[in-house]
Image (spheres, grey):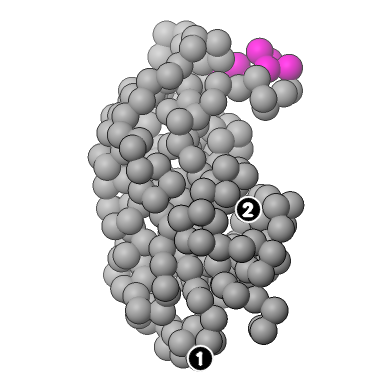
Amino acid sequence: MTKYECLLFDVDDTLYSHSYGFSNKCSKNIEEYMIQKLGIEESEVSEFNRVLYKNYGTSMAGLKAVGYDFDNDDYHSFVHGRLPYENLKPDPVLRNLLLSLPIRKVIFSNADEIHVAKVLRKLGLEDCFDGIVNFESLNPTNKTSNNFDGGYLVRSGSRTAINLDATNGCSSLLPKSPIVCKPFEDAFEQAFKIANINPHKTLFFDDSTRNIECGKSIGLHTVLVIKFRN
């Protein structure tokens, strides 16, 4: 471990097991938000959400990119606020391991501050990290935005979808999102500046292969985490 100056950790499905079902519940909450708050047709929402996540890293970033204007705090409250936090249990093994490592430890999550704090508290890890980079850190001035240029969002009656044919398979032709998030380089570079991180001397832990691949491409040493419930 002497070659590293920092350990950089994702939160969801990294510090706790995927088997808790938070990812599935979060996806359901996102789809319900899209139906109830944004008026997207229920029959289209699952595929629409999948396409947004695939192209933009998070559904929220995709929704903003294609022109939906909503309050970030309201979105996070709806999507994360209804998660079953009571299911998360303290992890004394992980806690003792983290505290035993004499290296700076930093959280790097796309999630909002409230969600990250709740998860760390439920896991008993709230005092194990030296810094936290979260949604608010990466998007300090991002409130609401509507930068849709009319090019790629198709609404036909109640149908809403991204017209992928219009991009000719080129992601660079998709409208740009105002949201900064993993797995894109600008999110990593911003996190490095915020937390004063040298990527070449940092070990990065994440459950997402996309995040790992991007992190590795810009100099991080990486560990793909597959965490099972004890």
**What secondary structure is marked by label 1?**
helix
Q: Amino acid at mark 2?
A: Asn
Q: Is residue 8 above or below residue 143?
A: below
Image quadrant in which you'd find residue 90: bottom left
Residues at marks 2 and 1, CA–CA distance in whole angstroms: 26 Å
Residue 227 seen in the current view = no
Q: Residue at x 53, y 87 (%)?
A: 102
Instruction: Of the two numbered discs 2 and 1 on the same chain, state the one appearing first in sequence.
Output: 1
Q: Point out residue 72 in the picture as x, y percentages from the top left corner.
A: 31, 38
Q: Residue at x 54, y 26 (%)?
A: 176
Relative to residue 151, is residue 147 drawn left or right?
Answer: left
Identify the residue position indicated by label 1 in the image: 100
Identify the residue position indicated by label 2 in the image: 211
Label 1 neighbourhood size at 10 Å, few (<14), some (14-19), many (20+)? few
Q: Point out residue 199 in the picture as x, y percentages from the top left corner.
A: 64, 61
**What secondary structure is marked by label 2?**
helix
Image quadrant in which you'd find residue 83: bottom left
Viewer-nearest residue: 6 or 42: 6
Q: Amino acid at mark 1?
A: Ser
Relative to residue 197, is residue 23 drawn left or right?
Answer: left
Q: Residue at x 63, y 68 (%)?
A: 202
Q: Residue at x 65, y 20 (%)?
A: 173
Q: Is residue 8 magenta?
A: no
From which residue to which does the magenta span run?
162-168
Q: In front: mark 2 or mark 1?
A: 1
